[in-house]
Amino acid sequence: MGATGPTHTAAPARPAGIMALPRPSLRWLPVYLRNLRVWRKLALASIVGNIADPLIVLVAFGYGLGRLLPEVGGVPYILFLAAGSMCMSTMTAASFESLYSAFSRMHVQKTWESLLNAPLELDDIVIAEWLWAATKSLFSGVAIMAVIWTLGISRAPTLPLALGVVVLTGLCFGAIGLCFNALARGYDFFTYYFTLIMTPMIFLSGVYYPVSALPDWLAPVAAALPLAAAVELARPLVIGEWSQDWLRPLATLVGFAASALYLALVLTRRRFAA
């Protein structure tokens, strides 16, 4: 008897539930490469825009204020400021990309909706945007690091290891930015993020002065911020030392990055399901 069993066909992938964990795949790669190809047309202007502000801060405050504050924590002020400027530049670049640029592609240009006509899931697009924001921030962090080395502010052998901190910082703030991107209804919404979150964080995270200089009740709060963790990890490497307390700030950065990415996926799924 030539009976054959039932024919099974592959079921189309079902979209993830709103609260589901991300399902790893490489389908984010074409979206990431698309963003890279678009960015290459405006690369020079983008890099200059991302590094101009932190570079001005480093040179103006470092050399200007450094004449009045010869040393902070036993090191020259401009060397103290270098790690903070690098982390601040990384945070700013990741935030701009995951907020304004991602929002333009998602809401204004409807690029995400077009991409969803391909065999992609929303998670693939969000993860591609997250990794792309971290890549953009890496460009800025490397540029500031090159300036630090070129000006002779630091040529410590541990300086290249700070690249790992730059990558983690970009992943962390790229994920946080995508959370706010999922909630935004217009560009004006991002003003709240930059004014109420980023600006206070910059002044509380040890970029310009040690966190220990803050009042006793505020210092523990400031030390728990992701930018403070990044600065705490990067500063010893820029100075040329090995941190004795690297596990806590590393866990803080990784924890913020992982939890913010999951929250960004949940909020974005909810937005598109509405």
Image: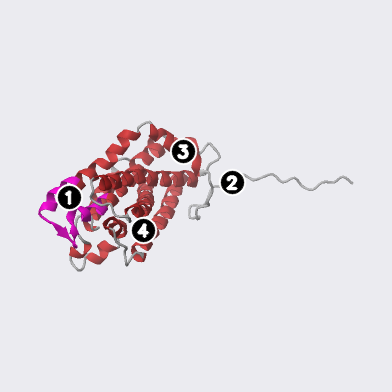
Mark nearer the viewer, 4 or 2: 4
> Label 1 sits on what residue type?
Gly
Picture residue at 20% right of the left edge, 55% below the top: 208
Picture residue at 38% right of the left edge, 41% below the top: 102
Up the image or down, 191 lies above or below 37; here it is below
What label does residue 131 carry, if any?
none
Q: Is residue 206 left or right of residue 2?
A: left
Q: Which residue is mark 1?
A: 62
Whole-number angstrom distance, CA of label 1 to CA of label 4:
26 Å
Q: Secondary structure at mark 4?
A: helix
User: Are dots 2 and 1 in contact, CB under 8 Å?
Assistant: no
Residue 135 picture location, percent across and down:
39, 44
Residue 226 picture location, percent across and down:
32, 57
Whole-number angstrom distance, CA of label 2 to CA of label 3:
23 Å
Who comes first in sequence, dot 2 or dot 1? 2
Range of residues picked out in magenta? 59-85
What label does residue 13 carry, if any?
2
Who comes first in sequence, dot 4 or dot 2? 2
In the rendered image, the residue lying farthest to the bottom is: 216
For label 3, the crowd category at 10 Å Cα-Cα, with few meaning under 14, some 14 to 19 and many 20 or more, is: few
Who comes first in sequence, dot 2 or dot 3? 2
Nearer the observer, 228 or 268: 228
Q: Which residue is mark 3?
A: 33
Q: Secondary structure at mark 1?
A: helix
Residue 177 picture location, percent across and down:
35, 48
User: Are dots 2 and 3 in contact, CB under 8 Å?
Assistant: no
In magenta stretch: residue 69: yes
Q: Which residue is mark 4?
A: 253
User: Are dots 4 and 3 in contact, CB under 8 Å?
Assistant: no
Whole-number angstrom distance, CA of label 2 to CA of label 1:
54 Å
